[in-house]
Amino acid sequence: MSIRLVIAEDTEHVRRMLVDILGLHGFEVVAEAGTLDEALRRVEESEPDVLVVGHRPQGIDGIEAVRRIRGRPPSPPVILYAAAIDGEVEAQAKEAGAATCISRTAGVEALARGISAITLRLDR
């Protein structure tokens, strides 16, 4: 059974790259979103196993996006995938409900490993 993802990223070329590379890793991207509102709708419609959120989906801070997503059912684990992850951002994201934070500088391979690690902990 493949792991179902929603990718919420406002930069289209980054979103397309994530969809393509994560697909090569065997993940099923069931929906994409460029805004927070769109991400909320896509999560509700597709009930993914994991949601990957960029740091600024359409100008909204990624941490606030995580908080809003985690506050509405269904609420899949959320990975904050951002360019600048430091201790403060990570602490704020985890407090908001993020399952983990992965820096873009670590690459998509690190993101794929993070998705796999989270889904191993899910009751599937």
Image: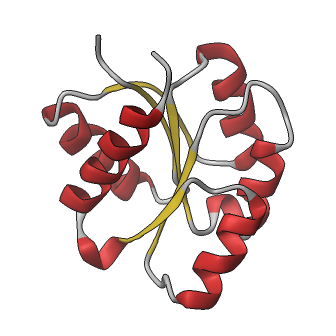
Q: Residue furthest left?
A: 24
Residue at the (23%, 67%) spot, across then down: 107
Q: Image check: 60 left or right of 10?
A: right
Where in the figure is residue 69, as x and y percent of width and height? 76, 44
On screen, residue 16 versus residue 30, left or right, reads left
Residue closer to the observer: 36 or 82: 82
Q: Quadrant of the C terminus?
A: top left
Q: Position of residue 94 (x, y in %)?
A: 66, 66
Q: Quadrant of residue 103?
A: bottom left
How many discs appear? 0
Res. 122 in view = yes
- Res 60 visible: no
Residue at 67 percent of width and 69 percent of height? 93
Q: Is residue 107 left or right of residue 51?
A: left
- Residue 109 located left or right of residue 51: left
Of residue 79 and residue 23, the one placed in the foreground of this image is 79
Quadrant location of the N terminus in the rendered image: top left
Rendering coords of residue 49 (x, y %): 50, 27
Q: Position of residue 65 (x, y in %)?
A: 74, 57
* Camera-side residue of 123 and 53: 123
Between residues 41 and 103, which one lies in front from this camera angle?
Answer: 103
Q: Is residue 73 above or below residue 113?
A: above
Residue 70 placement: quadrant: top right
* Colouring method of the image: secondary structure
Residue, x 49% and y 82% (percent of image)?
85
Task: Locate residue 38: give its quadrant.
Answer: top right
On screen, residue 48 above or below 101 = above
Residue at x 36% of width, y 34% of height: 120
Q: Please say if 61 is above or below 40.
A: below
